[in-house]
Amino acid sequence: MNKTKILYVDDESINLMLFEANLEKKYHVFTASDGLSGLNIINSEGDIKVVLSDMKMPVMNGLEFIQKARKVSPHICYYILTGFEISDEIQQAINIGIIRRYFKKPFNMNEISSEIETVINGFSK
Amino acid sequence: MNSIRFEHKITFIYLILGGMWILFSDSILNFLIDDIDYLAKIQTYKGVFYVLITTVFFYLFMKKHLNKLRNTEQELEAHRKNLQRLVDKKTKDLDAAIIKLSNTNAALNDKNEIINDQNLKLKKTLKALKDTQSQLIQIEKMASLGVLTAGISHEINNPLNYILGGLTGLENHLSDEKINDEKVDLYLNSIKTGVSRATAIVSGLNQLSRNKETYEEDCDIHEIIDNCLTILSSQLKHKIEINKQFAEQRIIVSGNVGKLHQVFLNIIINANQSIEDKGTITLSTVIMKEKVQIDIEDTGCGISKENLSKITDPFFTTKEPGQGTGLGLAIAYNIIQAHKGTISFKSALNKGTSVKIVLPVKSHKK
């Protein structure tokens, strides 16, 4: 069985590297260092199930990127991972269903992995 | 001459004249009239003549004197009337003056009242101004602190993320390679503890300096107090024994998380500063009906009676310059009021201070 494709967008390369290293066994991890590259990956791969994005990034922030991505791929589950406390903007995005959840950095890989599992199981049902 | 009175003189003169009339009238008549018959006739009327003469005298005399008396009386009466008039006029003038005075007095009283009112208003305005000023200072302070901590915590959270990510990777790798070493576990656990403590401090700071203005957040009282203790842990350790007597339930108050942090932080900072060498700070929470009572007691130097009433006044401080602005408790008081709660203080010099906060509870569950 092919591994589930997930995308992580963050402007900090160490975060990308660690994320991939920790989760590559379970998932097919794509990484991008900004929203534009993220959108390109979503467009070219097509069957990405989960997208996690940092909030504060150059060019466009996490929510702006996710809103653009949702127009192309509304079926993907989106998450925000940020070093900031939850803001009104993020809370609203959760409330209206733009993102499923918000994870605070430093984040627990296992927590993220179990969230992804729930989502995938939901898809497969 | 005064010794011989007028009536005496008159009586005396009358006596002399009468006596002389009796003694000499006959000889004078005899001398003047030769005719015996005629003399006899005159003799007969001599008494009548005398009476007539004296009557005329009496009449003239009485008239003159009585007139004098009457004139005097009239003059007196006129004087009296004049006096009465004068007295009446003066009385009227006085009455008018009194009325004028009392009017002036009333006007003065009114003005006094107005001045007192204005004084009161000024005092109120001054207090409001001071309150506003203190709030502005605090808001500005917290706003800049908020921007600063948000920035710093974001910058710290990323490297913390590297450490935690690296740690997770290491743990997974070691478990894959089946490496089981006590020392490695010790090192890994140290890193874990370090990361979680740093995370707690950063997150606590963030909670404290949140710039939200809403009073509808769910505030977990125990979490907030624990957060404050974490933030202050470097100041408290080795000096203060923390005695926590929390209710078993999780207590949620509807309010502002950041602002409630400020309240407990300020109170715990005060408690810490009041303890010179070593002491205890007791923090307890009790649920009472739909309210939570939070008591914070210290074994510090206490507050004197005269200062106790002033401690929530803005800018009142007994601390050394640089140690406190005198805003902490004023702000705490305002924040608790905004949460529809009450805050009260009890203190005994050299024994300690206890702060009691009562807040309406949104929910409490075990």
Image (cartoon, rainbow, N blue to C red):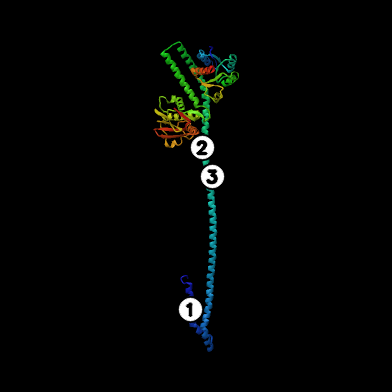
Same subunit, labels 2 and 3: the answer reads: yes
Instruction: Give neighbour class at mark 1: few <14, some 14-19, many 20+ (Cα, 10 Å).
Output: few
Provide the secondary structure element on which disc 1 rests: helix
Tell me the chain of label 1.
B
Is residue A60 shown to the viewer in this render? no
Tell me the chain of label 2.
B
- The label nearer to you, 3 versus 1, is 3
Q: Cα distance, mark 3 to mark 1?
A: 90 Å
Same subunit, labels 2 and 1: the answer reads: yes
Marks 1 and 3: in contact by CB < 8 Å?
no
Q: Cα distance, mark 2 to mark 3?
A: 20 Å
Instruction: Give neighbour class at mark 2: few <14, some 14-19, many 20+ (Cα, 10 Å).
Output: some
Residue at the spot of label 1: B16
Query: Of residues B319 and B120, which is closer to you in this image?
Result: B120
Residue at the spot of label 3: B114
User: Residue flagged by tag 1: what amino acid is it?
Assistant: Ile
Q: Name the spot of residue A63 as percent of width and height, x first.
A: 57, 21
Q: Name the spot of residue B232 as percent of width and height, x first.
A: 45, 26
Residue beneath the point at 52% across and 36% down? B128
Q: Name the spot of residue B44 as percent of width and height, x first.
A: 51, 85
Q: Cα distance, mark 2 to mark 1?
A: 107 Å
Report whether B295 appears left or right of A44: left
Q: Residue furthest front?
A: A125
Residue B80 to residue A29: above or below: below
Instruction: Give neighbour class at mark 3: few <14, some 14-19, many 20+ (Cα, 10 Å).
Output: few
User: Residue flagged by tag 2: what amino acid is it?
Assistant: Lys
The numbered disc on residue B127 is 2
Provide the secondary structure element on which disc 2 rests: helix
